[in-house]
Image: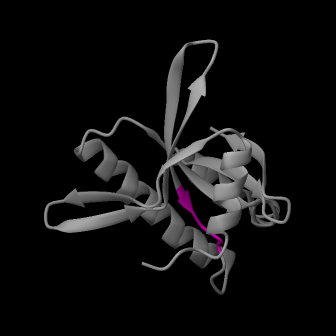
Amino acid sequence: MARDIIHDAVRKALEKDKWLITDDPLDIRLEGTTLYIDLATERVLEAQKGKEQIIVEIKSLSKRSLLESIYGALGQYIIYRDALEEVEIKRAIYLAIAAQKYERLKEIPFLLRSLEKNGVKLIIVNIKEQKIEAWKK
């Protein structure tokens, strides 16, 4: 399983934001196949005295075209979301992308609307600074 080229930068950005990486990757075994989701993370919520737990799939969106990259990322996100539901892992799943790619996505509003319509939650990461810029729920 090959890691995405922005994997380490996204992981460091999450860690800087006080997330503990619990799985890298998270293996989901389901009906004769294994899915490898990039990261499982958690962090302690001081105010609520509990934990927040999420799953993160990382995509550099580096195919020939942004449209082609979104085809693959959206399909993978939906499959992973459905697999988590099947095995009863009750964590939100996020798609982590570089801030630079998010800016390009904003130039094609249809693609952002499609991601939103399909319930895709985004983590926008400044790759160079290894910092989370925004959460889009």
Give the x, y percent position of residue 13.
Answer: 72, 52
Q: Is residue 60 magenta?
A: yes
Q: What secondary structure characterizes most of the magenta part?
A: loop
Give the x, y percent position of residue 125.
Answer: 75, 55
Whether residue 85 sits left or right of residue 76 in the image: it is left
Q: Say which residue appears at 71% left-offset and 63% top-offset.
A: 9
Give the colouring mode of the picture: one colour
Tell me the quarter of the image containing the N terminus: bottom left
Tell me the quarter of the image containing the C terminus: top right
Q: Quadrant of residue 86?
A: top left
Whether residue 18 sits left or right of residue 90 in the image: it is right
Q: Of 73 and 25, which appears nearest the observer?
A: 25
Q: Of 126 and 44, which appears nearest the observer?
A: 44
Whether residue 66 sits left or right of residue 73 in the image: it is right
Q: Of 104 and 6, which appears nearest the observer?
A: 6
- Identity of the residue furthest to the bottom in this view: 64
Q: Say which residue appears at 30% left-offset and 52% top-offset.
A: 83
Indicate whether 36 appears above or below 45.
below
Q: Say which residue appears at 36% left-offset and 35% top-offset.
A: 90
Indicate whether 71 appears above or below 94.
below
- Identity of the residue furthest to the left in this view: 31
Give the x, y percent position of residue 128.
Answer: 84, 66
Indicate whether 55 appears above or below 29.
above
Q: Say which residue appears at 51% left-offset and 26% top-offset.
A: 51
In the image, which residues are magenta? 57-61
Q: Quadrant of residue 27?
A: bottom left
Q: Of 133 and 102, which appears nearest the observer?
A: 133
Give the x, y percent position of residue 104.
Answer: 80, 66
Q: Is residue 123 magenta?
A: no
